Image (cartoon, helix red, strand yellow):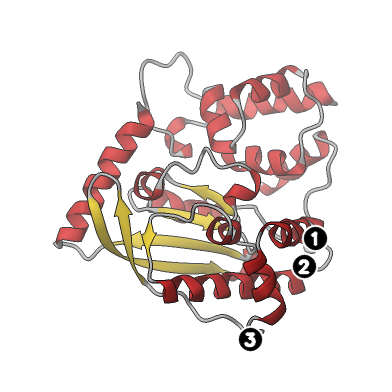
Amino acid sequence: MDWEFGRMLRRWRDRVTPESAGVPLGGRRRASGLRREELAALAGISTDYLTRLEQGRSTSPSAQVVEALARGLRLSDAERELFFQLAGHAAPGLDVVPTRIPPSVQRLLDRLANTPVAVYDATMTLIVANAPYDALMGDTSLLRGIERNAVWRNLVGPGNRAVQTPEETAELEARLVSDLRLTASRYPADRAVGRLIGELSAQSPRFIELWEHGELEKPRESARRKVVDHPTVGHITLDCDTLVVAADDLRLMVYTAEPGTADAEKLALAVVLGTQALVE
């Protein structure tokens, strides 16, 4: 069974073209499918670990790794379910926070390939970000575990490149914790949510304060206008729209600038410079 998982992993990797996965073409290729390092980057794992999975030298991938690989491989619903079974897991059910990107959302991402977009689950944990988003906000492929969670990043970690006043920061923190509380109430059986809350409680007195005494009603929408402090092109004022995919409990954060403005030119330059750096 373990060998079968690796065999199917290799077979599906060979099937996916770089173009369909949003991977930049670089250098000569001996095959049309994804290289190991390309799929590993898409899934957020090391190339060495992917190699060991394919060769059957690692035989216990976590459900999170299987989900990330299924996403990078663009598997259908039936293939995804088989992939989980081969890895020794049941595909996540309705009582678990969804992290799957359905084909309809993937098509939307493909059409926004030149626009900075990041997809978060209901706990505000980053699922995937495209190359323009990484060029604008920094390389997300290096983030691991709780580092990918926006609540942790804003209350404990380094934050992001958005420029905020102290009042805006406080509002954002309160909104993130309130949203997480609502998510926890929707998925009481999801142990990963409980672990996330436990880690945040252990690392952030501010989180405890907001969790115990913060607002209980549904949080307000975040401000659409954001100023991003890009290390190369400076401040860029952008519209940040959060699109909620209700059926899959996903959030798409989309950054755009008004055409013909200086901010649009800065955004285009940041994307070009950043994507070139990522390819190199």
Q: Nearer the viewer, residue 184 or 252?
A: 184
| Identity of the residue drawn at 27% across and 46% down | 270
Q: Nearer the viewer, residue 110 or 128?
A: 128
Q: Is residue 16 left or right of residue 230?
A: right
Q: Is residue 224 left or right of residue 237?
A: right
Residue wearing tag 3: 217
Residue wearing tag 2: 187
Q: Is residue 19 left or right of residue 123?
A: left
Q: Which amino acid, mark 3?
A: Glu
Q: Secondary structure at mark 2?
A: loop
Q: Residues within 10 Å of mark 1 (few under 14, many from 20)?
A: some
- Which quarter shows the N terminus? top right
Residue 190 tag number: 1
Q: Are marks 1 and 2 in contact (CB under 8 Å)?
A: yes
Q: Earlier in the sequence, mark 2 or mark 3?
A: 2
Q: Nearer the viewer, residue 25 or 118?
A: 118
Q: Residue 47 at x, y = what percent? A: 59, 23
